[in-house]
Image (spheres, helix red, strand yellow):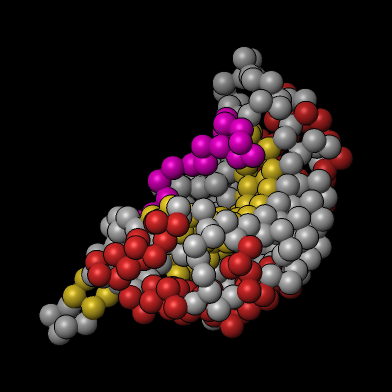
Amino acid sequence: MTIGDHLSELYRLPARTFPGPEAGADGLPDAEAVAWRITSDVYDADEDWPAAFARFCAAVDTTRVRALIVGAWQEAYETEPTAVLEALLAARDRFPALRALFVGDMVSEECEISWINQTDVTPLLDAFPELEEFGVRGGSGLRFPPVKHTRLRKLVIQTGGLPAGVVRGVGASELPALEHLDLWLGTSEYGGDSEAADLEPILSGDRLPRLRHLALRNSETQDAVAAAVAAAPVVARLEVLDLSMGVLTDEGATALLAGRPLTHLKKLDLHHHYISEPVQERIRQALTPEGVEVDLDRQDAEDDEDGDGTVWRFVAVGE
């Protein structure tokens, strides 16, 4: 599966794409009413992203903007968003109300998720200390050295392969307000080289005292992730545990059932999985009577067997 739709909302605001230069700026909504998506074209762009952003800043009262979505930039399949970050950093003082920022909202027709080139995105967190939500899509070249941010409540990193250095950087960060963490770990084929041990600082919960929603998903090593989560101290204070979109089999699901209690959860999300029906039923019987919402929708997770008996299983979002 690939990503076929742009973000529909950010910070509980409907997403609105800022129009191109040919459309003009008449009839725009109030600056604070939407999450503004600023975009260029990946291929043969008539206007680069910084130019589109400059038009946006001239047309909209940026002091009232609450959410920004960075869409496509020129040649994102081979170009880091250096110019994008420079434009945002230069304009930091013009966005005192900004509370949410997402970088890389591209669908597969623009640039496959594992082709999106990224960079060190933490300067944005340093520049916008009032941010409450931050997200990024694309793992190629992505860097996330340890950062301290006292207001961030939600962090989302979507990739087809998340570098181990990013996982370790998130785990070493000081994020005392973080309530929602969502990491798409991906596959080794696309740079996802983290191991379960890299998750330990996150799973201990020591630096994440307010974490309530933990998503570690889209992993080819989902069984190992599930086994690590099963013994994790942070589980006791979670409301939502999301291990979806990956290669989760009976091995990982059984480890979860044998680990720390999950009956306090509001939701356990395991959609897109490779769990047998008997083990699925064990999960339902253990959790559903306790009021836990369990998502066991298999979706398009189907085994693919070669003529020699080799069985292939795939994450939900790879390329």
Query: Looking at the figure, which quarter contains the N terminus?
Result: bottom left
Q: Where 213 sits versus 87, above or below?
A: below
Query: 180 above or below 90?
Result: below
Q: At which x and y percent is residue 55?
A: 70, 30
Q: Position of residue 189 (x, y in %)?
A: 43, 75
Q: Residue furthest left?
A: 307
Q: Position of residue 81 (x, y in %)?
A: 65, 54
The quadrant in which residue 206 appears is bottom right
Near-viewer residue (152 or 1):
152
Write the residue at 61% across / 67% down: 236
In percent of the image, x 74 and y 41: which residue is there? 99
> Residue shown at 71%/25% (left/top)?
31
**Where's the C terminus, which quadrant?**
bottom left
**Can residue 38 be seen here?**
no
- Give the x, y percent position of residue 221: 44, 77
Q: Nearer the viewer, residue 281 or 43?
A: 281
Quarter of the rendering containing residue 234: bottom right
Observer-nearest of 275 and 196: 275
**Which portion, as a residue range, is magenta?**
1-17
Q: What is the quadrant of residue 22 in the picture?
A: top right
Residue placed farthest to the right in the image?
93
Callout count: 0
